Image (tube, grey):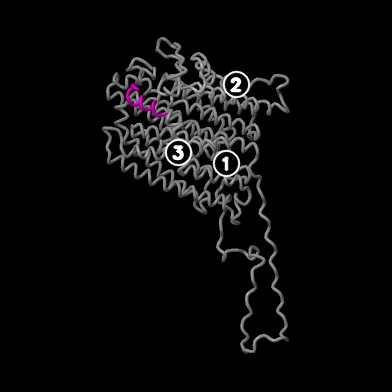
Amino acid sequence: MTVIDISPSVMQFLLAFIVVAPLLGAVAALLPAPPGLKGRNPDQAVLRHGVTVTGAVLIAAIVLATGFDHDHPATMQATTDISWIPALDVRIHLGIDGISLPLLLLTALLTFLCALYSYFKPPAGPSPKAFTALVLVLESGTLATFAVLDLLLFFLAFEMVLIPMYFLIARWGGDQRRAAAWKFILYTLLGSVVMLLGLLLIGLRSGTFDMVALATDNGRGLTTSVQVIAVLAIGVGLAVKTPMWPLHSWLPDAHTAAPTVGSVLLAGVLLKMGTYGFVRILLPIAPDGMRTFAPYLAAFAVVGIVYGSLACLTLARKGAKGDLKRLIAYSSVGHMGFVLLGIATMTPTGVNGALFANIAHGLITGLLFFLVGAVKDRYGTADLDTLAGATGAALYGRAPRLGALLAFAAVASLGLPGLAGFWGEMLTLFGAYSPAEGLSRPAFRTFMAIGAFGTLLTAAYMLIVVRRVCMGEHLPYSELSPASTPADAPEPADAPDPSGAGPSATTAPRPAAPQPAPAATTPQLADLQTYEAATWTPLAALTVLAGLWPAVLLGLTDPAVQKLLAGGKS
């Protein structure tokens, strides 16, 4: 069933347009604006150009989704297959199925929202021309990663996003931006070198780099030892990008230093590339190797869940001088741990949960980083102790709509039933309860219990954040200063007369106690702006929609996952 009947040739064009248009738009952004399109100034013109290009890509992605055959989501659609390097049998092979389509839509949506946000709130830093061009190159590389079906093209697209993100952090970031950018690029490049070796091993041993053919073969053309080596090499590169504990240490620094738009794209899109590689490459192409490493992957995943939550609890406590952006970054380590746990189960339930958690994390954490960036702009800091203050009139009292949206995003992140974050975590835990044949059931049930404990820790630190940032610190009455004593507090009763005579009419009245000066009115912050509401509402709405109607997403992913795990057989 398709919403709109679109011919295969048009579907091919749409997918190619989605991948190539941002790259062409990046080149155009560096050129002088044509007469009549300059607007008020060149900076505004180039930012409007970014909105136009990303908007066109989003519209094309939506049209592609409406033309997608939802009755056969396990079949590769909108495919293009052109020979590129005949000597190596490398082909320009593009296509989408129920696994890649949601990620394609998520990438197009988040990039458009980032461009729209940047148009109304231009980034502080060098020329917006370079900023817009880098965002568009980043979008092209990410979309290509989810659309290509050749191992070497996958690697090229996977690496294409590193340089734009490096410059976004290094040139438009905050404090310690250069050190954070170098740490990001070194970690990811070193992991990618190892991953390339594993991809070449698979391609050369099997005689093809075609991901569809390799998935259909289901590892039958590769010995177990080759699969184990390939999974180890490729898995390291993918784990760095995910990031998996203990290869995560670049992430908090990168998020803390990155501009708001950089943090949104890094958390909402780039982290998904690593987990997508596990599902698209390792599960179907090297199943025996994955089965060997699955218990270790699950163990690292649950350690990451608990570690990320404990780090967040440490940052959230009073007096820790924790940075709110850094806390959200550590929360991503825990949330991506659930994704890895689902993948490690090698079951349809677990893998579907992992894919659902991927999309939910992109929506919710993208919204959180937008909100944290807005709070930092208003306060001038993301320090939790400063944001909490000591008046009890934090965001709820100073910017109530902004505070309410932050509280909504926080409870969505902790997995509240009825919102998107709930289903991914629940399905991954169900998958761990009954892992694939050949995996230790007692071990995975232990991992399930640890992961479930991690959900409690997640709820704890998110509720602490809401209490402190949205409500502020409430001091005990005994610690209030005289100036904060209520003006209408009753006077203390007179002490009894020692003579027992009691008060008389001739007793001189006691002088009235001086009234404290009225406390200064808490200064108001700018509440939710129109452009902010336009940028963030789609993410909040989709978070609710996915939570209340999970079948929309699971109906796409489940048939494709079933086919992938069955060795290409529906």
For discs 1 and 2, the disc positioned in front in the rendered view = 1
What is the spatial separation of the Cα atoms under label 3 and label 2, in whole angstroms? 33 Å
The vertical placement of 66 against 248, above or below, is: above
What is the spatial separation of the Cα atoms under label 1 and label 3, in whole angstroms? 23 Å
Residue that mark 3 sits on: 249
N-term-proximal mark, 1 vs 2? 2
The quadrant in which residue 567 appears is top left
The vertical placement of 191 against 211, above or below, is: below
| Residue 569 image offset from top left, x and y in percent | 33, 21
Q: Which residues are magenta?
A: 557-570
N-term-proximal mark, 3 vs 2? 2
320 or 316, nearer to the observer: 316
Residue that mark 1 sits on: 371
- Tell me whether circle 3 and circle 2 mark residues in contact (CB < 8 Å): no
| Residue 292 image offset from top left, x and y in percent | 29, 31
Q: How many marks?
A: 3
Q: Amino acid at mark 1?
A: Leu
Residue that mark 2 sits on: 25
Q: Amino acid at mark 3?
A: Ser
Q: Main secondary structure of the magenta part?
A: helix
Q: In the shown orientation, is residue 153 left or right of residue 23?
A: left
Give the residue at x 42% y 14%. 90
The vertical placement of 99 against 518, above or below, is: above
Give the residue at x 56% y 49%. 469
N-term-proximal mark, 1 vs 3? 3
212 or 317, nearer to the observer: 212
